[in-house]
Image: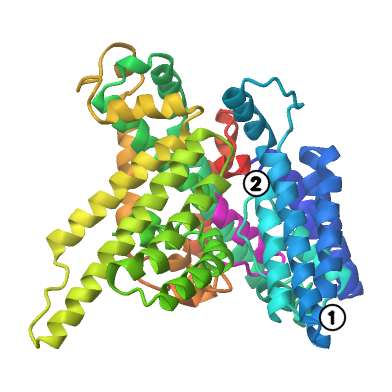
Amino acid sequence: MLFSSYQFIFGFLPLALIAFYSVARFGRIPAMVTLAVLSLGFYTYWRPQDLWILLFTITFNYLVGGQIQRDRAAGRDARRRWLLYFGVSVDLGMLIYFKYTNFIVENLNLATGGDWNVARIILPLGISFFTFQKIAYLVDSSRGEARKTGFIEFGLFASFFPQLIAGPISHYREVIPQFHNRLFGRPEARNMLVGLAIFAFGLGKKVIIADSIALFHNPLYAAAVAAPGSIDLVTGWTIAVSYTLQLYFDFSGYSDMAIGLARMFGIRLPLNFHSPLRAASIIDYWRRWHMTLQRFIVTYVFTPLSLPLNRFAIGRDMTGWTGFFFMVAVPSFLTFFIMGVWHGAGWGFVVYGLLNAFYVSVNEAWRERRKRRRRQARKEKRAFAEIGVAERIFYHVLTLACVFLGNMFFRAESLADGIAVFKGMAGLGGIAATGAFAAKMPPILYAMMLVAAIIVAVMPNTQQIMTRFRPAVNWRLWKDEAPAAIMWRWRPTAAGIAYIAVLLFFSVAIIERGQAVFLYFNF
């Protein structure tokens, strides 16, 4: 049941809103129970036999997290640490089993000539996201950042349907305190209208832009990988750019819809997407793309990795670039490699992870070089040249090229497919599109890509448009202006409501054009 489906828009959502606000009149606990049951029903719709996995992770992490909190309060640090290791190991073990077992066995068979057989394991929907959410809860409990909570509250936090399948990966301190707000469960016209507006923006991005590009990208990609040796420069770059734009508006649309849906129920979620293709560095790109995943990786992977490496380097009095290698480059490389591989089990994702790890490491080295040059200039009391407009444009173009290349391995159904498209992008298959490829790249595809690129470059994003309504829990951290004078602010006036109505009408009218899905639902 996709957010962009008739079953959801005209079936589940209105029934869920009516049920939640009707029951909320009897108290906060009945409201939470109702919303949690609705969320579990939403998850069950996809694959009922996977419900036990979600229920197990909720119960297991609630019990382990609660005991960790009690051990911390009692000063039992050794047991608290072992419980944390145990809980995280179980969570990661489940994720590795369901997500990577088949991939590991297949490659072991190839490497050893073995014949181990493992039944095809179907990936439970959303396991990558709700596993990270539970790990964050356990670590926060160990650090004293998550407090004791009731099972119903935790169950709703862990199963809340807008963020269950593809994020944002929310934290205890961001969501659970909202369940105690005196307005929780009270129908507020402001929340409903603002949530509907944000949902409409997301639905429009998904259905009107992302799915429209997919109608042309998918057959072009299929034709290209069917004839890998003949992919030319134009075809290769058209595939790469069109997919990146499709993925951009698909995930941006989902992120908006998740935040808008939560707002209809009176809950604010954290932002997960903030115009990443405007970034002038790969580090800034990752700060803006899947923001809660990047936050999780930095907090719970980079920091634990960097601390022992920092101690190692400091203990051996490492300075200069040697110290930088151990304290920054190595943990950065490992962190972003893990982030890439987290997206899926396949050699394409391994290459995607390695590419982004390399990008970030080089970017960190470049930033370190500039810092040292700036310090040296200050020491010598001379001027230091800051980045000019031309240089910034160059870095922006370079960042986009790196993103396009990485996304082709992200998109590839096999490593061979990714390499074939990369060769085309490098011009090894010729320059101009001919024959079947040319026929699959009509002018309308380029027109849609141009419109999408203009929206990316100069139009305000959803949180900028909705900034007066505090659209997310962390909206103040991302209040920067759009890069052009086109700074429209939505208002609940007759014109604003009419705009949302028209956007919803056209989006709903073309929902059923294809078999489109949210791309991040695969992870």
Give the image location of residue 282, x and y in percent: 35, 56
Quadrant location of the C terminus in the rendered image: top right
**Tag count:** 2
Q: From what the image shows, is residue 496 above or below residue 203?
A: below
Q: Is residue 227 magenta?
A: no
Q: SS for tag 2?
A: loop
Front one among 400 and 86: 86
Q: SS for tag 1?
A: helix
The answer to which quarter of the image holds residue 279 is bottom left
* Residue 1 seen by the camera: no
Outermost residue to the left: 382
In this picture, residue 489 sits left or right of residue 234: right
Q: From what the image shows, is residue 350 above or below residue 152?
A: above
Mark 1 crowd level (few <14, some 14–19, many ≥20, 10 Å Cα)? some
Circle number at residue 70? 1
Q: From what the image shows, is residue 69 above or below residue 111?
A: below
Give the image location of residue 312, x and y in percent: 47, 71
- At horizontal 85% and vertical 53% (from top left) the residue drawn is 55
In this picture, residue 138 sits left or right of residue 347: right
- Return the residue at label 2: 3
Instruction: Give the amino acid type for the residue marked by disc 1 in the picture.
Output: Arg
Label 1 vs 2, first from the N-terminus:
2
Quadrant location of the N terminus in the rendered image: top right
State the extent of the magenta-drawn residues as a range: 254-270
